[in-house]
Amino acid sequence: MCRSIKPLRNMDHIVSEQEIYEAALQYVRKVSGYRKPSKANEKAFNKAIEEVAESTRKMLGLLTTKTLQEKS
């Protein structure tokens, strides 16, 4: 697993769009093997980031989590 991708579930704050984007970016970088894609692959790279971020948003919205009171 890519160590720079941090868990976004059960954080002590609402997950920001920036945090979702950064996790998606790290995932796509790891899977593609590119830190920065060539111009020829840039469109596919950016599309993948958008799709991973959208899937992450959907998944986080569907997961059930403990409330702060249940954690105590």
Image (cartoon, grey):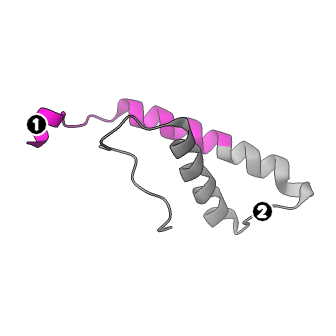
Question: Label 1 belongs to which residue?
Answer: 70
Residue stretch in magenta: 50-72
Position of residue 6 measured from the top left corner of the image (x, y, whole percent): 43, 57
- Whether 23 is drawn above or below 57: the answer is below
* Residue type marked 1: Glu
- The structure residue drawn at horizontal position 59% and vertical position 58%, both measured from the top left corner, is 26
Question: Label 2 belongs to which residue?
Answer: 36
- Whether 27 is drawn above or below 51: the answer is below
Q: With 25 as the anchor, is 1 left or right in this view?
A: left
Does residue 57 belong to the magenta stretch?
yes
The overriding secondary structure of the stretch rendered in magenta is helix
Asked whether 68 or 43 is in front, the reply is 68
Asked whether 66 or 11 is in front, the reply is 11
Asked which secondary structure carries label 2, the reply is loop
* Residue type marked 2: Lys
Does residue 5 belong to the magenta stretch?
no
- The structure residue drawn at horizontal position 8% and vertical position 42%, both measured from the top left corner, is 72
